[in-house]
Amino acid sequence: MLIQCHYFGIALRVLPKLLYGENHAYSMPLTGSGTEESISKITQDSLIEFHKKWFKPNNATMIIVGDVSMDEIKPKLEKYFKNWAAGDLLQKNITPVENNKEETIYLIDRPGAQQSIVLAANIAPSPSNSDELAIESMNEIIGGSFTSRINMNLREDKGWAYGARTLLLRTKEQRPFIAYAPVQTDKTAESITEIKKELLNYLNENPASEEELQKVKDNNTLSLPGRWETIRTISGDLTQLVTYGLPDDYWNTYPDNVRSLTLDRLKKSAEAAIKPDNLVWVIVGDLNEIEEKIKALPMNKIKKLDADGNEIAP
């Protein structure tokens, strides 16, 4: 498992820049670890300066959950935060980007690896610019749950992976749609083929079924009483409203909105979020064992990267 996590981390480090390009706010490693260059530049003064620039009341929202009323909490907030001055706000570069023009495979060599990490991704619409309930539901069916199609294929049917998933990261603007699986080394190329096949089938001849949609509806509504048992979960769900620009009544109307989902909405969301012809593949594994079979796949653009995402000359 340590090998799996380490190699998956390598893929997540290099993926964002391949999707978003240089100088985009979302091009930083998804591991949250930054880069060697960026970390070496961190000083006490730089941390203080960052705090001054970004921590401002006109760049913040206070969310309080507990056995407390507005009349009780407001005087305390005014007492402790009255001297917190507003200021000019900076803007991060989260401008829209285009998907990769052609499907590309990036190979990262890890000699002796006991398994390979197969990861495929493309740019998908943001939560505030999509049918969020439908896009989350369509993702549950293709790869976002244990009984999803990709997991049932690679894990239960083929036995090539312990688990395979898809996910849609939540961001303020365009987000990644990611399919991934740690797979046995000798089935790396075959796993690429199966993941691509599942995505294509989902968009074309085998879209979500009524039975799959009903299962999603049941899972997401019948679990609600337990979902909001803790203060932490309630505050987390309220935070989503603020962060992603969702309407204030999003959770109040959530059960009825989930039950009103249709297959047509799921199909349109899948078409908006999944772009098989524009996928960025990142494969981490022992290239001596997997490279030749990958080169035999019907994909013309294959490049090699080092562990930092720098292209290696052929």
Image (cartoon, rainbow, N blue to C red):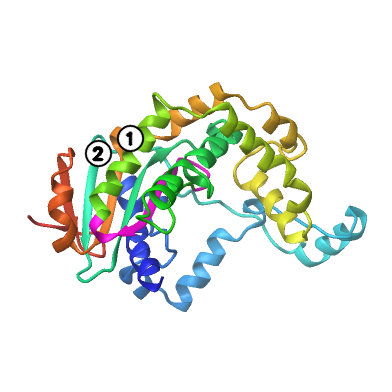
Residue 169 is marked as: none
Foreground of the two, 121 or 211: 211
| Magenta highlight on residue 58 | no
Q: CA distance from mark 1 to mark 2?
A: 8 Å
Confirm whether residue 136 shows in the render.
yes
* Label 2, residues with CA under 10 Å away: few <14, some 14-19, many ≥20: many
Taking the image as shown, residue 131 lies to the left or right of residue 6, namely: right
Q: Quadrant of residue 219?
A: top right
Pinpoint residue 38: horizontal percent, then vertical percent: 35, 68
For mark 2, what is the residue?
103
Taking the image as shown, residue 303 lies to the left or right of residue 314, namely: right
Q: Quadrant of residue 263?
A: top right
Residue positioned 39% across, 24% down in the render: 204
The magenta-colored residue range is: 169-186
Q: Amino acid at mark 1?
A: Pro
The C terminus lies in which quarter of the figure? bottom left
| Magenta highlight on residue 170 | yes
Residue positioned 36% across, 52% down in the render: 16
Q: Quadrant of residue 273?
A: top left
Foreground of the two, 213 or 101: 213
Which secondary structure, mark 1?
helix
Residue 276 is marked as: 1
Q: Are marks 1 and 2 in contact (CB under 8 Å)?
A: yes
